[in-house]
Amino acid sequence: MKIAMTGTSGNMGREALKQTLALRSVELVRVLLTFRKRNDKLAKEYKRLYGDRVEVLRGSVADEALCKKLVAGVDYVVHMAAVIPPRSDADFHASEECNKLGAIAMVNAVKATEPQPSYIHISTVALYGNRNEKHPFGRVGDPLPVSAFDCYAMHKLEGERYCLEAGLKSWVVLRQTAMLHPNMMHDNVSDGLMFHTCLNAPLEWVSSRDSGYLIQRILERDAKGEIGDFWKKVYNIGAGEKAMQTGYDTFKDGFGIIGGSAEKFFKPDQLAARNFHGVWFADGDELETLFHYQRDNPSDYWKEIARHHKIYALGKLVPAKLIDLFLFRRLLKHPNSPYVWKKNAQTDARAFATFGNAAPPKSWKEVKLLSKGDFGDFAALRSVENAKKNGLLLSHGYDEEKPMEEWDIADMRSAASFRGGECLSQEYGDPYAKLKWKCHDGHEFEMTPYTVLRGGHWCPACCQPAPWDFDRLAKDSPFLAQVWYDSHERDEDVTYRYGEHGEHLAEKLK
């Protein structure tokens, strides 16, 4: 078996490479590394650890000619490359090059190769946008209201849609959830990123180790012909109920290894109130049933991080006020901190996008927390079965009890109407045969039924941020409105966009 991989310098990619090479059936893994200096060392490490079983190519994933060399003669392509926050927040062009243009180049390379390898595309939970206690559960087919100015998610959405619509013979899209990895603490104390986390954001954590194991299991089981109709679908990578936490719980576990907590280090109004991302997956069991990869428990994994980094134990010997003074107050002043945006609210639209008009809590006593039972029993709220039974899942606008094999033109018309548009085609072919659609703005476009109904995508003209126009779109799309108004007022009427020089702007609708 020969495999091509991108993104092996990242946390999931390292694990996927290591665990894939644990399979005796794998003859070669060809990887693509950029020319960043740290990858010089990594290329040498691969040679030392894996010898001739790893072949390294160097360059940009957006280089289509290089991508064709990467995928030539392989059986599988695993595309994991991503520029993620905080780097994507600071470098729009790096995000676009990797997350959008890189995905397009990889798909084109796979499509041009004969025989065509199977393509595994790693997407992201960030596509689902902001969630809170009102609709904490999500699933494939939900709306994709990418948070304002989240260029990482915006570019990943465009790359994913290109994959879905490319007509590849054998593909799968895996939307990765929040991921725990050994360097969690270190990687989140360089800028203001941690303050983007909403306290009641539903976060379902999976470890990088389990994520890599999932890739191994897919390759292993598919090579044996054991996974049936797995391909040509979108799935959510999760870790089950044991891993369903909130932003507050994450601070509790993470800061707990240095003897701290959110209450000790933060004031509640320093953290974002919305415009984040995260969701608990109501359909996360689909991948688990096929591959049985969910092994790590988040709380135990944090303890493992503490054992791996002995220096964190010293934090318990330092007064919390000193840690706050010399670490967190410094991060609060970083340009990527919502606290800075709020101080510059007259010129930085990220302030309103992140906080809205609601008065922020002045003390922790005023904060209502999902995980502390302020919205009902937390254990019951985390139950997928309860969510289904109590109608807490979002509607997709058609008869979802009907198997995909039985879809018809009536389902297409119903789904389009729920999105405020129309299905212009008169006949239905199959889930992957493109139909003609029209959105409520009058844009006509072609897209497969699967991309619309199961992917959650819609009009590539007006549902393709930037600009972020969801306040307006939600007025005509019940599909979007059912989740958008969980964290936005119906009279906000704001469009968010980048200015000529990359500034963050908000404009009132006329």
Image (cartoon, rainbow, N blue to C red):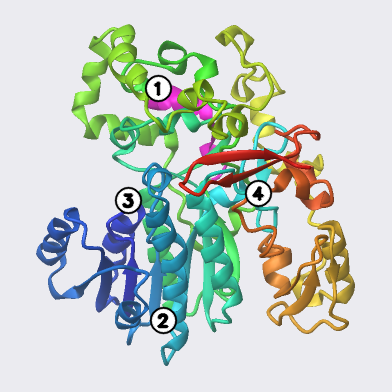
Residue 224 seen in the current view = no
Residue 404 x, y percent position in the rendering: 75, 72
How much space separates mark 3 and mark 4, taking CA atoms?
A: 26 Å
Q: Residues within 10 Å of mark 1 (few under 14, many from 20)?
A: many
Are the residues flagged by discs 3 and 2 in contact, CB closer than 8 Å? no
Q: Which residue is mark 4?
A: 145
Q: Which residue is mark 1?
A: 332
Are the residues flagged by discs 3 and 4 in contact, CB closer than 8 Å? no
How much space separates mark 3 and mark 2, taking CA atoms?
A: 25 Å
- Which residue reaches farthest bottom? 114
Q: Amino acid at mark 4?
A: Pro
Left/right placement of residue 440 relative to residue 166 reads right
Q: Which residue is mark 2?
A: 109
| Badge 3 element | helix
Mark nearest the camera among 3 and 4 is: 4
The stretch of residues the image draws in magenta is 240-254
Left/right placement of residue 333 relative to residue 43 reads right
